[in-house]
Amino acid sequence: MKKWLYAAVLSLVQPSPTSALAADKIAVVNVSNIFEQSPQTAIVAKELENEFKDRATELQSIKRDLQTKMQRLQLAGPSMKDNERSALEKLVMTQREDFSNKAQAFEQDNHRRQTEERNKILSRIQDAVRNIASKEGYDVVIDANAVAYASNAKDITDDVVKQVK
C-alpha cells in the first residue's frame, strides 16, 4: 500500500514528457531599462515639474515666512506684550496648519500625477512588447529582472526601445 501511494505521489510531482510547457519561443525584456531610456520619461518629468512649480514655490514661500515668524516668536517672544505674543502664536499655529494641509495636498497630487504618467509610459511599453511578440512569434515574454537564467530566450529590449521612441 505504501509503495502504491509513493508511486502515485511521485507521478504527480514529476512531469511526464508529454506535459512539457507548450511555449516554444521565449523572450526577455528589461522594462526598467526601457522606462529609463524612454525620451517620454524625461519629457514627462519636465512637464510635471512645470505643472507643480507654482505650488512648490508657494509652499517654499509659506515655509520661509513661517520660519521667520517662529524665530521672531522665539527671540522676541519673552519680551513681547502678552496680547502681541498670543496673536503671533495664534498666527504661527494657523500658518503651520495651512502649510501642513497645502504640503499634504501637494504631495498627494504630485504622486497621483506621477503615477498616471508612469502608467501611460508603461502601457506604451507593454503595447510595444505585445506587438513585437506577436510579430516575431514569441509565446512568452518575461521581464529580464524576474529571470535568473534563460539560455534559449532572446532579449528583445532593444527592439522595444526602438518601437517606443
Image: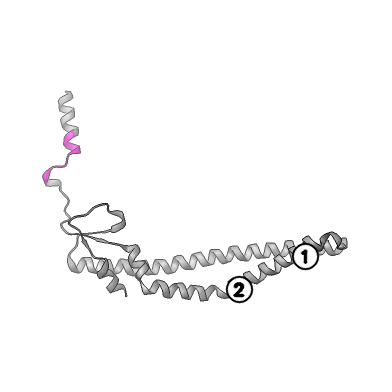
Viewer-nearest residue: 119 or 53: 53
Mark 2, residue position:
57
Nearest the viewer among 69 and 116 is 69
Question: Can residue 91 be seen in this snapshot?
Answer: no
Image coordinates for residue 161, horizontal then vertical, percent: 29, 71
Pointer 1 local density, CA inside 10 Å: few below 14, some 14–19, many at least 20 = few
- List the residue tagged with mark 1: 72
Callout 2 amino acid: Thr
Q: Quadrant of the N terminus?
A: top left
**Which residue is pictured at 47% across the width and 76% down the height?**
47
Q: Could you tell whether 13 is left or right of 87 in the image?
A: left
Quadrant for residue 147, please give it.
bottom left
Q: Nearer the viewer, residue 78 or 81?
A: 78
Residue 14 counted in the magenta span = yes
Q: What is the secondary structure assignment of the residue under circle 2? A: helix
Q: Going by the picture, which residue comes out furthest to the left?
A: 17
Residue type marked 1: Arg
Please report contact status of discs 2 and 1: CB closer than 8 Å, yes or no. Answer: no
Relative height, residue 5 to residue 164 (above, below): above
Residue 59: image location, x then y, percent: 62, 69
Give me the residue at 18% from left, 67% from top.
136
Q: Nearer the viewer, mark 2 or mark 1?
A: 1
Q: In the rendered view, would you say 2 is above or below 47?
A: above
Residue at point 15%, 57% (across, down) = 24
Residue 119: image x %, image y %? 40, 66
Q: Mark 2 packing: few (<14 Cα in 10 Å), some, or many (20+)?
A: few
Segment colored magenta:
10-17
Residue 69 position within the rendered picture, expressed as x and y whole percent measured from the top left: 75, 66
Judge left or right: residue 15 versus residue 99: left
Q: Is residue 31 magenta?
A: no
Residue ID at (33%, 70%): 124
Residue 29 placement: quadrant:
bottom left
